[in-house]
Every structure is written in C-alpha cells, then in structure tokens.
C-alpha cells in the first residue's frame, strides 16, 4: 500500500509540471503570433501607404495632362522649367489647376506636388542629357511625401501634341492687331457688370475655326476668374463653339499678351458673314454675387479701328440674357481668328 501511494504522488507531481510546460508553450506561441500579427499589420499599413501615394502621384500626372490639354501656351509654357518650383494640383471651378501656393496635406498625411524640367534632344531627335532644348516637351516629376522621410515619385514626359496636330496647318484668317490701350474696360467682376464682345466679318470663303487669340493682361494685385471664349452668331445669338478654359492667374501681368483659346471641335463659319467673340468667365461675370473676380484687361484700339466689326461691353449684365450691352463705337478689341484645313 505504501508503494502505491508513493507512485500516485509522483504521478500527480508529473502532471503539474506538464501543465506548466504546456501553458508556457501556449504563452510563447501566442506571443509569437502576436508579434507576427503586429509585423503583418505594419507591413499592410506600409503597403497601403505606398499604394495610396502611388495613386496620388499618378493622379497628379493626370492633372498635369488636363491643364496641358486646355492650353500648352497658357498653362505649361509659362511655368518654371528648372525643377526648383513645386506646383500643387488643385481642383477649382470643377477642373484641375496648378498652383505654386502650398496646400494642406491630403487626408492629413500626404503632401503632393509636381515639378517641371527642360528636355533636350540630340542630333537624332532623341531625349538626351544635353543638346537642343525642346520647347514642346517637359519632364514632369510627380512626388508624394509623408511620415518621416517617406516618399513616392513618378516621372513622365508631356508634349505639346496640339502643335503637331493642328498648329502647323493653321492659318490666320481675320485679325485686329492695332490694339494698344487697356485702361478703360476691365473684366470680369462679381458685381454682374457683364461680358465683353468683339464682332468680326468672316472671310470670303467658309472656314473651320480651330482657335482664337485674344490680347489680354491681368492686374497683378487681383487673381481673376478663369475665362473662356464663345463664338456666336451675335452677342446674344446661338453659341457656335466654346473654347477651352484658361486659368486667369496664368495670364501676363506686365503687358498685353496673346492668349490662345482653342476649340476642341472646329467651328464652321459661313463665307462673308458677321460673327461675335464673347469673352466669358467662371463664375459668370454677368451675375451679381456669383463670386467672379478680376481684373483682366482686353486690350483695345481706337485710332485705327477694325472695319469689319465693333466692340461692346456689359453684355448680359445683371443676369439679363437679353441685354445686348453697350456698343463701343470706334473701339475694337485685339483678336486673331485661326482656321484649320
């Protein structure tokens, strides 16, 4: 009987040791799994951040292409091409714009910007480190930064494809280039003062208008609204074509400069008929309290007026679509009409 009790006691003691060992193994296994889960979460979070940054960088390139498509001359050619200036893509008035003003972090985390650099080509017209500068190509670096020194970059090249598609074959058909004054007629404003127009006579043969150039300057003290041009039968007549929208802040502040308004679809004009260019803004300059701001000057001439048309101001003012404006006798705004074959 004594021997049996002794064996039972040893058996009970051995079970307790086993239990302690098993518990230790379970705890260690749990800790291993916890550490693995933490590492997995960190990897997942890092992968998620990298993916979000890559998507944001790609979206910035799409923003650059969008403003390029509106106008290379007004939106790309005027930007710093040394790579020193950061441009931040923002959406204003429902479209992409590039601004040099720093923007808040996206989702409180990511800082996104693009830079532009010159592109050089060698004797075989290939992109090279040096050679002849290509005025119609830019190297774009889209960069997203976050956290402590984390970043993601995408590099691409953009070209002024419209120059090769339509610019080379375009012909100037009608113009008034004797404009030199710019102090009397400003546009746009938020008081509903209306739009500016210039009528013109189409040439003796029917044409397809691809773009119009207007002689504009902006006031450096105020950021004007974005603008676009309409081709109409007359100031209040049917709209025949609507141009690309031009970012107001890209217009020259030093002196009147030709600003290109391009039509995505060619506008057909009949031979020898009179038509009207109407300069418009977003928000509308014809609606009081719309939020429109100025100031832009459409440079005009008076000493040697254009015989085929006349300028007008205040068209459609105070939200009156039937108001034809004030006729500016002996005044004409600077314009050029281009056609494509």
Image (cartoon, helix red, strand yellow):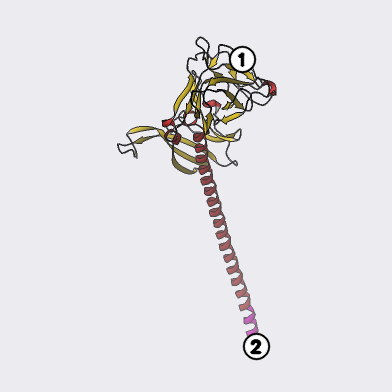
Can see residue 81? no
Task: Tell me where residue 326 appears, x and y as whole percent.
Answer: 63, 15
Residue 114 versus residue 207 in the image, above or below: below
Task: Using the image, tell me which numbered label, if any, was put on residue 4.
Answer: 2
Q: Which mark is first along the chain, 1 or 2?
A: 2
Mark 1 residue element: strand
Residue 173 visible in the picture: yes
Residue 218 vertical placement versus 17 (above, below): above
- Which residue is nearer to you in this view: 166 or 149? 166
Crowding at label 1, few (<14), some or many (≥20) Cα neighbours within 10 Å?
some
- Residue 123: give x, y in percent of width and height: 30, 36
The residue lying at 45 percent from left, 39 percent from top is: 141
Q: Nearer the viewer, residue 76 or 196?
A: 196
Mark nearer the viewer, 2 or 1: 1
Q: Nearer the viewer, residue 292 or 116?
A: 292
Dot 2: what SS? helix
**Is 11 in the magenta?**
yes
Left or right of 120: which side holds 294? right
Residue 333 occupies which quadrant of the picture?
A: top right
Which residues, given as a range, are shown in magenta?
1-13
Is residue 1 shown left or right of residue 82? right
């Amino acid at each position: 009987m004594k021997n049996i009790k002794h064996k039972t006691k040893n058996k009970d003691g051995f079970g307790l040791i086993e239990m302690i060992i098993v518990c230790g193994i379970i705890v260690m296994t749990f800790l291993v799994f916890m550490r693995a889960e933490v590492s997995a979460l960190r990897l997942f979070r890092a992968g998620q951040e990298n993916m979000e940054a890559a998507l944001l960088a790609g979206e910035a390139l799409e923003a650059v292409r969008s403003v390029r498509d509106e106008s290379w001359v007004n939106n790309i050619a005027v930007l710093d091409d040394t790579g020193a200036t950061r441009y931040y893509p923002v959406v204003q008035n429902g479209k992409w714009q590039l601004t040099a003003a720093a923007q808040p972090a996206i989702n409180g985390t990511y800082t996104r910007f693009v830079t532009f650099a010159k592109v050089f080509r060698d004797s075989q017209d290939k992109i090279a480190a040096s050679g002849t500068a290509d005025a119609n190509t830019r190297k774009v670096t889209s960069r997203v930064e976050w956290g402590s020194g984390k970043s993601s970059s995408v590099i691409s090249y953009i070209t002024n494809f419209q120059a090769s598609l339509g610019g080379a074959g375009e012909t100037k058909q009608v113009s008034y280039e004797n404009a030199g004054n710019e102090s009397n007629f400003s546009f746009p404003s938020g008081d509903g003062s209306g739009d500016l127009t210039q009528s013109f006579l189409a040439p003796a043969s029917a044409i397809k208008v691809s773009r119009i150039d207007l002689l504009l300057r902006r006031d450096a003290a105020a950021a004007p609204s974005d603008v676009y041009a309409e081709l109409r039968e007359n100031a209040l007549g049917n709209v025949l074509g609507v141009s690309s929208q031009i970012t107001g802040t890209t217009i020259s502040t030093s002196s009147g400069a030709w600003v290109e308004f391009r039509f995505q679809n060619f506008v057909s004009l009949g031979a020898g008929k009179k038509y009207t260019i109407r300069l418009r803004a977003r928000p509308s300059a014809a609606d009081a309290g719309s939020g429109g701001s100025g100031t832009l000057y459409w440079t005009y001439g008076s000493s040697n007026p254009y015989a085929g048309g006349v300028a007008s101001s205040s068209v459609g003012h105070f939200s009156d679509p039937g108001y034809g404006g004030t006729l500016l006798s002996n005044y004409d705004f600077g314009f050029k009409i281009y056609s494509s074959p």
